[in-house]
Image (cartoon, rainbow, N blue to C red):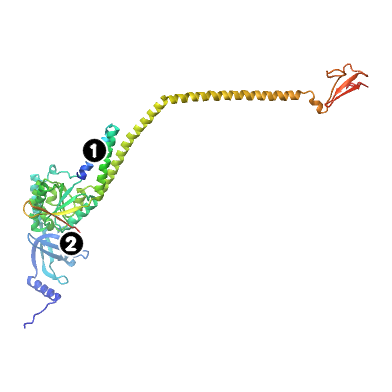
Amino acid sequence: MESRHVYTVSEINREARALLENEFGTFWIQGEVSEITRAASGHVYFTLKDESAEISGVRFKSRTSFLSPPDVEIGSEVLAQGRLSIYEPRGRYQFIATLLQPVGAGALQRAFEKLKQQLQEEGLFDPVHKRPLPTAPEAIGIVTSPRGAAIRDVVSVLERRWPCTRVLLFPSAVQGDAALHELPAALDRAERFSRDVHPLDLIILTRGGGSAEDLAAFNGEALARRIHACQVPVISAVGHEIDFSIADFAADHRAPTPSAAAEVAVPDVADVSRALHAFVQRVVDRVGFAWRQLADQYVYRVDACRARSPVRRFETHMQRFDLVTTSIQQSIGLHWKAQEERSKHLAEVLRLSDPWLPLARGYSLTSRAGETQPLRDLGALAKGDEIDTRLASGKIRSRIEEVTTNDD
Amino acid sequence: MTIEQELKQLEEIAKQLESSELPLEEAIALFEQGMKLAGTIRTSLSEAKLRIEQVIEKTQGDFKLEALDIE
């Protein structure tokens, strides 16, 4: 039995690396930079590509003096010198550059600019073609991959802002050669669906971020023409804020990201609820006002009727009668009170004028015997005359012994 | 009627109520109509759930809808 050598992973990576390094040695390569990352370590990682393939590359820190950052960026066509190797821990095949220099603008960028200019001249991007977006779409068509990040982002925003809509996904590849044909076909399918099956208020054409070549399918001419001809308004949202595609220019509205596309596509349910509340308040106020007006009129009329009613007249008479009666009672009362005071006063005067009253306190009245006229002075009284003295309890008859005047 | 149409109709009712000197009876009828509409919209908004479907076209013009779960 023939014995087979069994490699460990490390062994095969090590041997493959040696083979690659020895076989190719140092060489020159030309391509377009499609990704470039300047790591914190100082190493620069990049990808070079042409129409049909790409290769990962790295420039280690010690040699980066050749790589001046402003000159090499995504889209740059570069001429590089270096060798091939394998990064053993990951088994990754890569180009290790020792020299990297730009060779004019990238070919893809040139193609992009050429197509953009051509379509612009044809009027495909004219503002006059841009249609307004519906305010509250009932059905939204989405052209993207069912497995990408874009559909998840769009759906999560729609669920939060405006869940009362219907999302219809028209699946399509969103990168590579397949996408060049599938994207316009999916858009065409969405438009026919809208016309024949169920109307779409809006179509969102989208994919998440990626490298320039990942997004390249959205720069296709067929897609741009399809968007322009589409009867349903189209929002284009390709990659991130910094990425502009031909599709963006041709669409009715460009959104910087898939989430942003969903944000502009629908109103916010919270805003609508607030508006609804304000409306109900307005209507209640209006009707409440009309009601109060009517109620006021009613009260006014009831008052008017009451003022003319016989009961009211009777009430008036009764009131007048009451008034008069009261005043009579009052004046009688006053009069009576005055009379009473007056008679009390007279009684007191009379009481005080009772001639007998002083006698009770020890005074007495004197008169000539047999007369009633009280004596006020000694007058013609002389010794031997008879006088009567009246006290409270009786009378004394006396004869005068002596008369003396006060002057003596 | 879609929510958008309902909202538009509600706006119309509000305008009528605010601008014209309607007899009270008509105003109250409009008011009741508006309140009913507002209730319908409020219910639609609170009970709404996003429907997500995938549209497949087997042969030209033959559309098929499939429910789609987005995790």
* Quadrant position of the N terminus of chain A in the picture: bottom left
- As drawn, A165 above or below A376: below
Q: Amino acid at mark 1?
A: Glu
Mark 1 — residue? Answer: B12
Q: Position of residue A287 (x, y in %)?
A: 31, 36
Residue nearest the viewer, comparing A231 with A340: A340
Outermost residue to the top: A380
Q: Chain of mark 1?
A: B
Image location (x, y in percent) of residue A30? 8, 62
Q: Nearer the viewer, residue A221 or A337?
A: A337
Q: Indicate whether A300 appears above or below A251.
A: above
In the rendered structure, the answer to whether residue A144 lies left or right of residue A402 reads: left
Q: Quadrant of residue A294?
A: top left
Tell me the SS state at disc 1. helix
Task: Name the disc covering residue A37, or none.
Answer: 2
Category of crowding for the residue at label 2, using alpha-carbon neighbours closer than 10 angstroms: few (below 14), some (14–19), many (at least 20)? some
